[in-house]
Image (cartoon, rainbow, N blue to C red):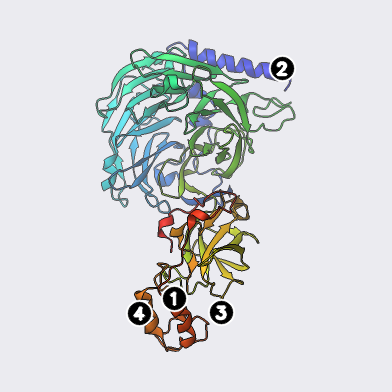
Amino acid sequence: MQLSSFCFARATFLLFVLSLVLTPANTTFAHDNDAKSVGNAAPGGSGGGGPFAASRVDLLSNLTLEEIGGGGSVLANDCWGWTDSASSRKFAIIGLTNGTSFVEVTDPLNPLFLGKLDTTEAGQNRAWRDVKVYNDHAFIVADGSGNDQGIQTLDLTQLLTVDPASPESFTATSVYSGFAWSHNVVINEATGYGYVVGANTANNSRYHRGGLTILDFSDANNITEVGSFSGDGYTHDAQAVIYSGPDSTYLGKEIVFACNEDTLSIVDVTDKSNTSLVARSPYPESSYSHQGWLSEDHRFFYLNDELDEYNHARGPDGDFGTDDDGDPIPTKTHIWNVEDLDNPSYEGFYEGVEKTIDHNLYVKGDFIYQANYSSGMRILQIDSADPTSLTEYGFFDTFMANDNVNFNGAWSVYPFFDYGDDDVIIISDRQGGMFVVERVPAPTVMGVDVNLAGEEQRSAVESISLRFEGDVTIEAGAFSLIQRSTATEETFEPLSITVNDSFANGETVATVTFDSHVRNSQNALEDGNYQLTLTASLVTREGIPMSEDFVFGDEEADGFFSFFGDSDGNRTLDVFDLLAFRKTYGMTSADPDYDFSMDFDAGGMVNVFDLLPFRTRYGNTLPFAFAKFKQTNQGGKGSSVTDRAFRK
């Protein structure tokens, strides 16, 4: 970067900060005229529409701005979610520049618009609106001078009785007016305390210097101020938690991780009347420390700087957001190690694949979900062995018009709904409305069937099938099969097998049949215990491999064995098996009572040649003897299966 360009960018940033600190009461704040204000944004519906570019993310549904109460100059902004604990019904909350929309997403394929809550002051059309949820209530704030939004409260249980055919115009349950307007509200759902950031009075003066205004939300309609923190100036966004990380000094305390324009600032708010700054950590070439989120183990903090891509490099023609050659600079995600809260360590940044502005990000599990404006939602995967190492897992581009360095496109994401095994994410796009998408997961074995699904008999085992969700690619050599033991000895002998897979109705089924260790022309397995191993790296879905090798038959409960005559799969030939054999004895394959599993030699008739091997096994048991056997897979036990108990 040329020195003159760097100095210009730094000077611009310093002037911006000074303007926030020194602004007179009658002066317009920076947000009112910045590049993402409503007047500077592309109008609703101008994002290019579908089909949408995506990788490892599937589109489930999309409601346009017009379908959720916006359109034209009324754009979308923030998003959050609410789940009714009694019914598990799910609702997306989408901020608009003139209000807030509510959409039921219980069925993510068929979202239902339920209605809209207008902003506190009719006619206001502000770019910034943020919402959080606590105790079945939504709490909504809006930024921008000259408005008296305060905090709108809406009782969300109203949504449960709305007829989607007649969307409602909601009225706020109550409005808190302890300040006029603010940038965001952060709520620690574990304590019921909220932290309003960037608050201002009606005459445009910073309230508590725009730092943390601490409120008690335990009574949704009687919010009370209980404290503040202003020792580090303006806070743009934050996350409040009961700290559970490795720093024993702060274990169990309520800690706020604040994005304070040019730093990550950590504040102890355990005592609301005596809050204190724990640490203040700047980082190189900061431009606007915007928002961030902790890893789930509270060891690392990931932060987006909204303006570094926009301000910090200028091309030869003076264009923002470009390097010295005039090319856009990649998106940066900044990373801190916060294992020692008194001494947070800036670890550097991840440089993204795309070259656009990052806005909001949230962490769920090992994934970071980012709303990156014109390049849509990006998903980064955190390396569990090295959480400072990030890689792009996938993306969904909600704004197809361009990937310019601007403030059009995806504003925020909400990845915290619980849809079981499905990772469903809400995206709010300024021009495109609400998107419901699903992260394509790594392949997972959803079920295993020995013979046909539901068959208990192990008298004639002719196949084993594995079921996967989605269209899965299985490479040659992915499956290996061994005979662990016979009735009398350990063997650990490999088998020759044939694998066929098919995809239908959203499911891939891989069926393994046997070419050795068989007893008849139908390739039924010889008596013995068997173990199937699936090599993770050779099974992929959209290029994503399984997380670990899958093993079936290494536990007795798997029931992967063959024992001629065992009609109920209990490993012992007893009177119940004798009755089953007698029922089919003398029958041919043309008879309705013919049972192929009792036809030892597959001769088409259950006769004396089948009676002899049945008699020699009668009264005997096929042991499993698990403790004597070793694991043969390299990836550990097969925890990729969702429920081992259901398998037969």
Q: In the image shown, does 580 or 487 lie closer to the viewer?
A: 487
Name the amino acid, label 2.
Ser
- Lower sequence index among marks 3 and 4: 3
- Lower sequence index among marks 3 and 2: 2
Image depth: mark 4 or mark 2 in front = 4
The disc placed on residue 520 is 3
| Inter-mark Cα distance, 1 to 3 | 15 Å
| Inter-mark Cα distance, 1 to 4 | 11 Å
* Left or right, residue 48 beside residue 419: right
Q: Which residue is mark 2?
A: 4
- Lower sequence index among marks 4 and 2: 2
Name the amino acid, label 4.
Leu
Label 3 Cα neighbours within 10 Å, binned few <14 / some 14-19 / many ≥20? some
Name the amino acid, label 3.
Asn
| Inter-mark Cα distance, 2 to 1 | 86 Å
Label 4 Cα neighbours within 10 Å, binned few <14 / some 14-19 / many ≥20? few
* Placement of the N terminus among the 4 image quadrants: top right
Q: Which residue is mark 1?
A: 565
- Lower sequence index among marks 2 and 1: 2
Q: Which residue is mark 4?
A: 579
- Lower sequence index among marks 1 and 4: 1
Q: Is residue 154 above or below residue 533?
A: above
| Horizontal and vertical percent position of residue 43 | 51, 39
| Inter-mark Cα distance, 3 to 2 | 83 Å
Q: Is residue 553 above or below residue 302?
A: below
| Horizontal and vertical percent position of residue 252 | 38, 24
| Inter-mark Cα distance, 4 to 2 | 93 Å
Q: Label 3's element?
A: loop
Residue displayed at 45% across by 89% down: 590
* Left or right, residue 572 beside residue 633: left
Q: Label 2's element?
A: helix
Image depth: mark 2 or mark 1 in front = 1
